[in-house]
Image (tube, helix red, strand yellow):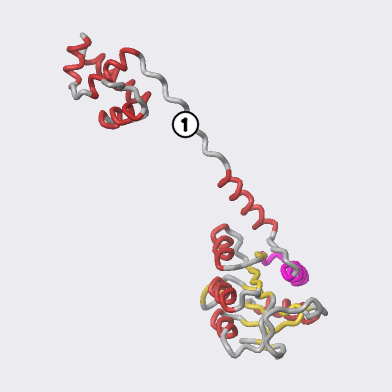
Amino acid sequence: MMVAMTASLPSPVATADAPIRVAVVEDDAATRIALVATLNAAPDMRLLWAVATRAEALAALVPPCTDIPDVLLVDLGLPDGSGLEVIAAARQRWPHCAPMVCTIFGDEKHVLAAIEAGAMGYLLKDSVADEVVQEVRSLHAGGSPISPLVARKLLLRAQAAAAPVPAPPPAEALSTREHEVLRLVARGHTLVEVAQVMGLSHHTTRSYVRRIYDKLRVGSRAEAVNKAMRQGLLGGQ
């Protein structure tokens, strides 16, 4: 159920002396009541409306709307859908509105989805109403409030993404004998033919081939020849 607080002429951006206009989308009745009471008690804020469902929130975004919120507090887990849709719709209709999530979901998936949808702040519900109102002030002043636990997860993710990928160890050089075997294999000779040409047993020839595969980090004759050609190991054959 929507709780309408005030009505005034539409204004896209609040002035420096005007109160911060806030709207709330929160399905938990106790949390919603606490936020409403604290926002109404704040002298520098004006609560426009508070709703409990996705449908009510989306309905509040379409004309005729009596006022445009500066800050939109949104829960993600609503009974009839996701608060992400509300955030995306609000950002599209009201570019100057700053949505801020207030939810129980602190995992990376929800955080990144909210940021992608247009959230400019992300709080967990371990924050009390007074703290949330203080973060509303911070957001309106140009900050991006984020709960410490969420910020840590984002930091760890960024560090993991920025970490250099370790280079593979350099390939072990082929011996002269292995080079000879590789050149014969590259010319299409069978292992039996290679053994005959080099005067080796079939078992020894197979051992050479296995070592060549290991050193080149390949698993077949075709891969060995292809990689050897790319690395210039075959010369003019």
Say above or below: 213 vs 78: above
- In this picture, residue 167 sits left or right of residue 188: right
For label 1, the residue is: 168
Say above or below: 9 vs 184: below
Q: Which residues are magenta?
A: 124-140
Question: Dot 1: few (<14), some (14–19), or many (≥20) neighbours within 10 Å?
Answer: few
Say above or below: 180 vs 122: above
Q: Is residue 159 magenta?
A: no
Image quadrant in which the N terminus is located: bottom right
Question: Which of the 4 image quadrants contains residue 217?
Answer: top left
- In this picture, residue 19 sits left or right of residue 60: right
Where does residue 135 sit, x and y in percent of width and height?
74, 67
- In this picture, residue 162 sits left or right of residue 68: left
Tag 1: amino acid? Pro
Where does residue 41 sit, x and y in percent of width and height?
81, 80
Q: Identify which residue, 208 or 104, lies in the foreground.
A: 208
- In this picture, residue 34 sits left or right of residue 189: right
Question: Which of the 4 image quadrants contains residue 98?
Answer: bottom right
Where does residue 140 sit, x and y in percent of width and height?
73, 71
Instruction: Answer yes or no: is residue 128 visible.
Output: no
Majority secondary structure of magenta residues: helix
Q: Identify which residue, 30 or 40, lies in the foreground.
A: 40
